[in-house]
Amino acid sequence: MELSKSAGSIKHSAIRRMFNKAMQYDHVISFTLGEPDFTASPNVVEAGCEAIREGKTKYSANAGIVPLREAVAASLKRDMDMEYDPATEISITTGGMGALFLTLKSLVNPGDEVIICEPYWTNYVQQVQMCDGVPVFVVCREDNDFMLDLKDLENAVTDKTKVLIINSPSNPTGSVLDEATLSGIAEIAKAHDLVVISDEVYKTIVYDGLKYKSISQFPGMKERTVVVNSFSKGYAMTGWRVGYAAGPDWIIDCVTKLQEDVAACAAMPCQYAALEALTGSQEFNHYMVEKYAERRKVMVEKLNEIPGVSCKAPKGTFYAFANIKELGLGSQDFADKLLEEKQVVVVPGTAFGEGGEGYIRLSYATDMKNIVEGLKLIGEFATELMNSK
Ligand code: PLP
């Protein structure tokens, strides 16, 4: 008896490994959290509870309840001036992960290549492998603000390339693709007939008045882009598991068809909660982003005060991706030793692919006290490392 080759080849996440290691200690300061430290706003919670009380606890249509699809379409119109037909071009899924997986499963044949920007959110790789596709990595470098270099992208395309996944704002680097880069990516996608999966789950968590732009808004791109989004990050609803895919009807039709066989639908009460999240007051989101902005400022300032460490301010998300190259330890060693010596947990950059070597990811979805205390300890650790050189 043996596991399938595709399942067997999938590795456990390095983030989980750090998490398990940290469990051995009574008190640790953790910067690993990939989810908001807030819970969904009371009106959203109440909408979910009300749906349960009213018996809205059945299977919904595979594509999700109609009012939620309509609300998603309205939000895409409002935010991006894009028209999506809620009947055929939007499917509600179990989180962004459900949307990503079902989209990949709809598109990828065994051996098809899927281009992924590195450092990457690891689930992309695993999901491509689960579809028997071949992940191909394009490294995004710090000197290019961790954006995709168009020449590198062009060089990575082969006649087997079918899909390109972009993630802006990016987990783990916090980078946001600028208009010129998006426009260049769009030209390459059209020239090589690629489908672009645009993972926009952090799109509402951006700073300094940045106006978010999606690749789907570029000429000729709506018909070859699947926008993936979710309620997890922007609305602090990670455990509610609601997301969506919006894209061309022939892909969305398949996503919905496959949904029948995997989850049937996103949980119905959670869909009603998501409906309230989209249509109710947006004040809570703005509050969360304000809090993240305050923490980001402190975190980046403090990181840059540490000898041998530097960090550019992330343009979006709640992650700082700090450069530790001068300290002379690999990312994994740094993270392991920091935990052992100071009981502070960070994610080594290599958890996001080899292109993350020399970096650590710190989530600031944690309170200010932890940020101040944790960075003091990282500062002590880095100083000791520098002195021992
Ligand atoms: N995309 C990125 C880049 C993420 O970081 C995550 C979660 O960490 C997701 C998608 C999936 O989010 P969810 O399935 O909770 O909506």
Image: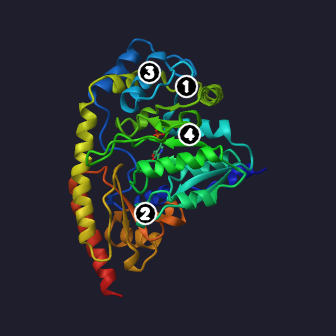
Can you see residue 370?
Answer: no
Residue 352 in the figure: left or right of residue 79: right
Query: Marks 3/4: CA distance?
Result: 19 Å
Query: Marks 1/4: CA distance?
Result: 15 Å
> Residue at (56%, 61%) from the top-left corner?
151
Q: Nearer the viewer, residue 150 or 172?
A: 150
Q: Position of residue 338 (x, y in %)?
A: 36, 70
Per the image, the residue denoted by label 1 is 89
Q: Nearer the viewer, residue 361 or 167?
A: 167
Q: Can you tell which of label 3 and label 2 is closer to the viewer?
A: 2
* Mark toward the start of the polypeptide (1 vs 4): 1
Check disc 2 and give the amino acid type: Asn
| Label 3 SS | helix
Q: Nearer the viewer, residue 383 or 178?
A: 178
User: Is label 4's Cβ within 8 Å of ligand 1?
Assistant: yes
Query: Disc number at residue 102?
Result: none
Query: Marks 1/2: CA distance?
Result: 34 Å
| Label 4 SS | helix
Per the image, the residue denoted by label 3 is 68
> Residue at (40%, 49%) from the top-left corner?
34
| Label 1 SS | loop
> Residue at (42%, 36%) from the top-left corner?
239
Q: Position of residue 29 (x, y in %)?
A: 31, 59
Check disc 4 and give the amino acid type: Leu
Per the image, the residue denoted by label 2 is 144
> Residue at (25%, 33%) from the top-left corner?
284
Per the image, the residue denoted by label 4 is 100
* Mark toward the start of the polypeptide (4 vs 2): 4
Q: Position of residue 347 (x, y in %)?
A: 42, 61
* Mark toward the start of the polypeptide (3 vs 4): 3
* Mark toward the start of the polypeptide (1 vs 3): 3
Query: Callout 1: few (<14), some (14-19), or many (20+) C-alpha neighbours within 10 Å?
Result: many
